[in-house]
Image (tube, rainbow, N blue to C red):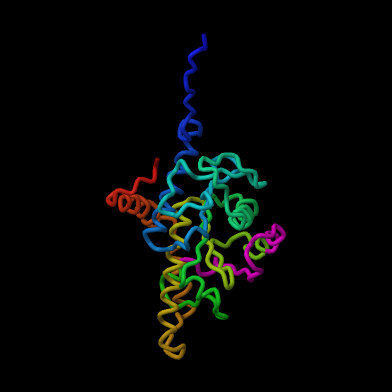
Amino acid sequence: MSAKLKPVKSASVRERVSKEEWQARCDLAACYRLAAYYKWTDLIYTHFSARVPGTDDFLINAYGLMFDEIVASNLVKVSVKGDILDDPTGFGINQAGFVIHGCVHEARPEIHAVLHTHTRAGVAVSAMKCGLLPISQHAMLVHGRLAYHDYEGIALDMDERTRMARDLGTSATAMILRNHGLLALGPTVREAFEVMYYLDTACQIQVDACAGGMENVLLMSEEAQRTSTRQFARPERPAHHKDWPALLRLLERRGIRYAE
């Protein structure tokens, strides 16, 4: 007489990770959904990451999912060495995503979130010799904390990480990858999202302004640049605790279920 076998139910991602990791997953999944809402996507080819709290591991999107398919439980966990530790979909990750994000997380341990985009305006400004110009208030959020890295081809070679880390330096919160796109960094997902929002908007403004001819573009005075940069850097700025809850409410009003 054969024994009756009972199916073994495997633990869900939420059950097998820490409370802190689950929160990081929810924040990163929300960031992906917001990127889809703001049209920062490039099919399946860009990537955001967040460090798993208390570790050197990080979370990143499965290679093959659109941004509006990403939820907390289908993010891939990767070690700093590139080993896949948890991949619920089995899709693996984009190698270029590991090269870029692994580089930043290793070089800048205080950075917990990294966003990379190929938006039309971002790539346009990355191809301008002048780089990002001081012509908008939005540009001032990253003024003085913006780095540049020259294009070396698709970021598939690990040895590029040495040069990328060198160009990023120790204080930049954003990087323009020449002829490629944008990179935003932050100690939290919320802060990285804000950097990307302002940086991409500044690029859109610059493309629009330059369309009227460079002779019509007004650069800010150095004094105005210093003032606005200082104002953005003040620690008590209300956005630090007001914008992220508002953005999550935006997703919730639209029935976007990212935290599952």
Secondary structure, magenta segment, majority class? loop
Q: Residue at x 56, y 39 (%)?
A: 86
**Magenta range:** 141-163
Q: Position of residue 55 (x, y in %)?
A: 59, 40
Q: Residue at x 66, y 69 (%)?
A: 152
**Residue 177 in picture, x, y percent from top left:** 58, 68
The picture quadrant where one finds residue 37 is bottom left
- The image shows a total of numbered marks equal to 0
In depth, the one of 67 and 248 nearer the eye is: 67
Residue at the far top: name it.
Answer: 1
Residue 108: percent from left, percent from top: 61, 53
Task: Determine the residue located farthest toward the left in the rendered image.
Answer: 253
Q: In this orientation, which residue lies closer to the viewer: 103 or 15?
A: 15
Residue 75 magenta: no
Residue furthest front in the image: 1
Residue 8 vertical position relative to residue 227 in the rendered view, above or below: above
- On screen, residue 44 versus residue 38, left or right, reads right
Residue 143 lies in the magenta-colored region: yes
From the viewer's perspective, tell me whether residue 197 is left or right of residue 103. Answer: left
- Quadrant placement of the C terminus: top left
Residue 138 at what x, y percent from top left? 42, 70
Residue extending furthest toward the right = 159
Q: Nearer the viewer, residue 20 or 70?
A: 70
